[in-house]
Amino acid sequence: MKNNLRKYYQKSSRIILLLMLTLFTLSLSAQQQRFPKPEFETGYTQPSPSTPEPRATAWEYVDIAILLLVMSLAAWFILRKRSRKGILWLSIFSLVYFGFVREGCVCSVGSIQNMALTLFEPAYAISLPIILFFALPLLFSLFFGRVFCASACPLGVIQDLVIIKPITLPNWLNKTLGFIPYIYLGLAVLFAATGSDFIICRYDPFIGIFRMGAEFSMIILGIAFLLMSLFVARPYCRFLCPYGVLLGWTSKFSKHHLSITPNECISCKLCEHSCPFNVIDEPTEELKPEEKIQNKKRFTLYALLIPVWIFVGGYAMSLAHPFLSKAHPDVYLAELLIEHPELKNDTENLDIQTFLSSGKPMHQLVEEAKLIRSKYNTASWILGGFLGLVIGIMLMNQFVTRRRKDYTPNKIDCYSCGRCMNYCPVKATSKLSKEDKQSV
């Protein structure tokens, strides 16, 4: 069985390499301009665009249709065909199309920022395709689990395909690192809602790979994540992705989620060993009466402490709002000119020269910066309260015991990749006797 799997992955790796080489050639040809540059010399160097050119509306709906098709096929492969191979080929297609052809934009992960900005800035108009990119994966996860992560997200797929020898991280480390996506989600919403920055897009580690060019630091970051993915499966998805937080919330209530075995579980543990993400929950034993009482007391205690966590988190973040507000260009510029007024004579600073040429008085810039900082103060209280609530719920969940008779995927964290199904020796038509189970 191992030899067959090795041959299968070797064959898949060759195909992936061929596709990437083809895409690299196509991307080089795509970078040629539609019209040639003029032959006369002006001394002007034409800058390279950092983001893809806007698509026609019709093509944006084509992207939506392809996203729907991919997630629908993924749900079918997972729930009906129980095919890991089908999920694998779907994910390769998504990497090619949504990653290299569409250059990673627009993606569902980054659409969080567009949604936040349109909610808090009435002047910002969001397009329907971006709303659909944000909502459709969440809707699918509500019914079928995180099939978007398994097959349609290029950020997750590019990490998944390079997993070679994954290691199992300690449970305490998983939980600690698992808090980072909540922080990232909160900061992304904060900066987008205040019109400061789109940090998810700015610090996307794989954008340099998809667009065949980016800042040197971002290229290094993408390579680092891919090298890490060889041994720590999907590090960006597990310990950074803010959209994964939302998908986990909706996937928790999914009715038609991936199931490991189509029949009675024989507790062979093959599924547990096959999962590189450590998201297979083991069967649980019945707690003793005294253990149940103790857990209830601790659960009640942590539930009563949640308001304290919310207040402490809000207060702590409010202290950081002066620093966070510097992410907004107006606040940064106002502080820079107040602390260093001599910079007004710096003709090479484009931000300062643009402000001076606008004719806006200094006191108006300062007043606008104060207003923005006031908004940051309020938003920081909300962000800190949210993080405090998350910490309180995490502590409470330590004492929530759910009775499980079989090995089951964790609905919140499972990426529906299908590896566990592929390793499960139980077939849909099998009827095992007690002697068969013991022999297995």
Image: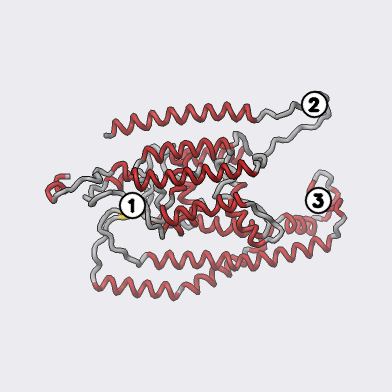
Looking at the rendered structure, the kind of residue marked 2 is Pro
Q: Pointer 2: what residue?
A: 38
Q: Between 101 and 419, which is closer to the camera in this rendering?
A: 101
- Please name which of the two marks, 3 or 1, marks the residue nearer to the observer: 1
Relative to 86, 389 lies left or right: right
Looking at the rendered structure, the kind of residue marked 1 is Ile
Per the model, the C-alpha gap separating discs 3 and 1 is 55 Å
Number of other residues with Cα within 10 Å of mark 2, as a class: few under 14, some 14 to 19, many 20 or more = few
Looking at the rendered structure, the kind of residue marked 3 is Ile
Give coordinates of residue 307: x percent, y percent.
50, 74
Q: Which residue lies furthest to the left in this view?
A: 435
Give coordinates of residue 101: x percent, y percent.
57, 35
Q: Which residue lies at the image location 62% right of the left edge and 42% below the top edge?
A: 58
Q: Quadrant of residue 34?
A: top right
User: Of helix, strand and loop, which one carries label 2?
Assistant: loop
Number of other residues with Cα within 10 Å of mark 1, as a class: few under 14, some 14 to 19, many 20 or more = many
Query: Which circle's residue, 3 or 1, is located before the other in the chain?
Result: 1
Which quadrant of the figure contains the C terminus?
A: top left
Q: Pointer 1: what residue?
A: 280
In the displayed structure, 18 sits above or below 436; it is above
Q: Pointer 3: what residue?
A: 352
Per the model, the C-alpha gap separating discs 2 and 3 is 33 Å
Q: Quadrant of residue 208?
A: top right
In the displayed structure, 88 sits above or below 264; it is above
Q: Which residue lies at the image location 83% right of the left edge and 29% below the top edge?
A: 42
For residue 89, which numbered disc appears in the image? none
Per the model, the C-alpha gap separating discs 2 and 1 is 61 Å
Number of other residues with Cα within 10 Å of mark 3, as a class: few under 14, some 14 to 19, many 20 or more = some
User: Of helix, strand and loop, which one carries label 1?
Assistant: strand
- Please name which of the two marks, 2 or 3, marks the residue nearer to the observer: 2
In the displayed structure, 210 sits above or below 294; it is above
